[in-house]
Amino acid sequence: MKKLFFLCLFLAAGMTVTAAESRNIYCTTFPLYLFTRNITDGCKNVNTELIIPPGTGCPHDYAMTPRDMRRLGAENLILVRNGLGLDDFILKPLRKMNPKALVIDTSRGIETLGLHTACRHGHEHHHGHGERNPHLFASPFEAISIVGNIATGLSEADPANAARYKANAAAYTEKLRRLCTDFMECARKCQFEKRKIVTQHGVFDYLARNLKLPIFATITAEPESGITASEMTALAAKLKGQNIDAIYTEPQYSSRVAQTLAKECGIPLASLDPVANGPADAPMDYYESTMRKNLEVLGKTLNK
């Protein structure tokens, strides 16, 4: 009888351990980490982490560290990635360390843009990503689809928490929808379709598409590699006399070139944050609050 009793205790303990088995959810980029945290909030036995340091800029050439490699070997690993060439750096190490890991491609099903869509001044720049623009996260409109992809992938991989994932995603999506509504109202009020802007990088192409805001030129498709003197001269010549409403920089990159162009061409200069990176202790609403600051900047600079 005692043997049967202890056997039952042992089996019950084993079932508890299995039921409480943790899920390790690793995100390749900062914005995906912000979205996933909101979706997994309050879920039991779920560990959500960011792979690359939160202050990292464009991650396409990020070099994995030995610590990163060890983390990829975690049991029950779910990888949330951007796709479209932005975070391909992780695919080979993942196949080596954890070939059975589940990968959620958050770009799935989203209508993407080419890399040169925003370039209006006749030049084509080559970017370090794939053939499609990977900066979906910089628009709250695309963020809604990204959140949906994450929630669906997590629900399928972890049925025990599926209801919570879906409820959290629905609540977070509602916040994003309200944000999108406010962006659209600003676009209507300021007549974005009649404006012309210059961006420092192709990161805001999707937001511009959603708001019907014409991007006349991008300063460079490779902000980390800069722009040559001849390219600067040619771009300045094309901007002069075009009634450009604003040049927008990004806090992730140097604004030196943009400042020079703005001064030489007499164009207002402002900064928009695509939320490509951020602080390690970012609050849960960091994405929405940053996007609302962008909304304020657009309203002030384009309200003619």
Image (cartoon, grey):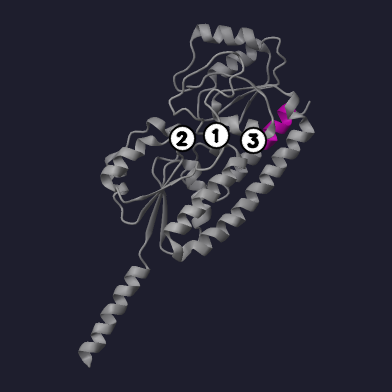
Q: Estimate the spatial distance between the alpha carbons at disc 1 and disc 2, rounded to whole Å.
A: 9 Å
Neighbour tally class for label 1: few under 14, some 14-19, many 20 plus, Cα within 10 Å: some
**Quick check: 6 above or below 221?**
below
The magenta span reads 295-302
Q: Which residue is mark 1?
A: 112
Q: Which residue is mark 2?
A: 84
The x, y position of residue 100, in whole percent, is 31, 51
The residue at 79%/34% (across/down) is 189
Q: Estimate the spatial distance between the alpha carbons at disc 3 and disc 1, rounded to whole Å.
A: 22 Å
- Identify the residue at the far bottom of this view: 1
- Callout 1 secondary element: loop
The residue at 36%/35% (across/down) is 89
Q: Which residue is mark 3?
A: 294
Circles 3, 1 touching at the beta carbon (< 8 Å): no
- Callout 2 secondary element: loop
Q: Nearer the viewer, mark 3 or mark 2?
A: 2
The residue at 53%/27% (across/down) is 114
The x, y position of residue 212, in whole percent, is 69, 30
Magenta segment: does it hold 257? no
23, 295: nearer the viewer: 23
Most common SS among magenta residues: helix
Tag 1 or tag 3, which sits nearer the N-term? 1
**Quick check: 37 above or below 225?**
below
Q: Tell me the amino acid under the disc marked 1.
A: Thr
